[in-house]
Amino acid sequence: MPSPRPLEILETSVISFLVERGIIVICTGGGGVPVMARDAGSLCGVEAVIDKDLASSLLARQLQADMLLMLTDVEAVYADYGTPAARALRRVAPGEISARYFPAGSMGPKVGAAIEFAEATGKPSAIGKLDDAIEVVRGERGTWFEAGAPPSLVEPRRL
């Protein structure tokens, strides 16, 4: 069963308060704790696993972030990953590719979250290797998703 889509980050005001004061906040790891509202207005936990990448994209939009950066153990998003035709994607316009071309248990959710953030905000999002974080932010490494990016590929094969 796929992870449910996050609808709201309830702690956004607290996270924003901390960020505005220069505090580094680590949040939405594992997507957060899923809850639902009862008729009386109270919250109760539900058994589910919220997608961490979509939760990060939602939080970045709620905070009006300048960029969404997703760091992982892979240097970039690859078209045709695992085949002889594999190639790293460097700059991608959000409408150029779709998350459905990438594995759901791997890069698919990250690509979907990156596209969602870039389309909703007009600001860049990027995916890259943790060790390359500074270079990814500078646009020197990783994969950048941004409006107006020059076409970089023919649709990858569906995986």
Image: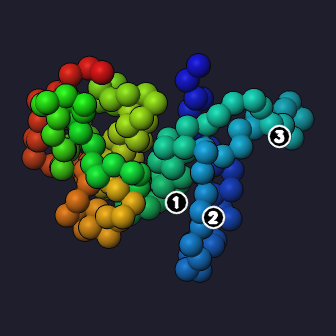
Most foreground residue, 159 or 94: 159
**Residue 18 at least partly seen:** yes
Q: Which residue is mark 3?
A: 43
* Residue 27 rendering spot, x and y as whole percentages: 61, 57
Q: Is residue 144 left or right of residue 57?
A: left
Q: Is 51 placed above or below 72 here? A: above
Quadrant in the picture for residue 82: top left
* Residue 65 rendering spot, x and y as whole percentages: 44, 61
Q: Residues within 10 Å of mark 2 (few under 14, many from 20)?
A: some
Q: Which residue is mark 1?
A: 63
Q: Residues within 10 Å of mark 1 (few under 14, many from 20)?
A: some
Which numbered tag is attached to residue 147? none
Closer mark to the observer between disc 2 and disc 1: 2
Name the kind of residue labelled 3 in the image. Answer: Leu
Badge 3 or badge 1: first in the primary sequence:
3
* Residue 29 rendering spot, x and y as whole percentages: 60, 51
* Residue 31 rendering spot, x and y as whole percentages: 60, 44
Badge 2 or badge 3: first in the primary sequence:
2
Most foreground residue, 76 or 28: 76
The Cα atoms of the two marked residues, 3 and 1, are separated by 23 Å
Name the kind of residue labelled 2 in the image. Answer: Ile
Q: Which residue is mark 2?
A: 15
Name the kind of residue labelled 1 in the image. Answer: Leu
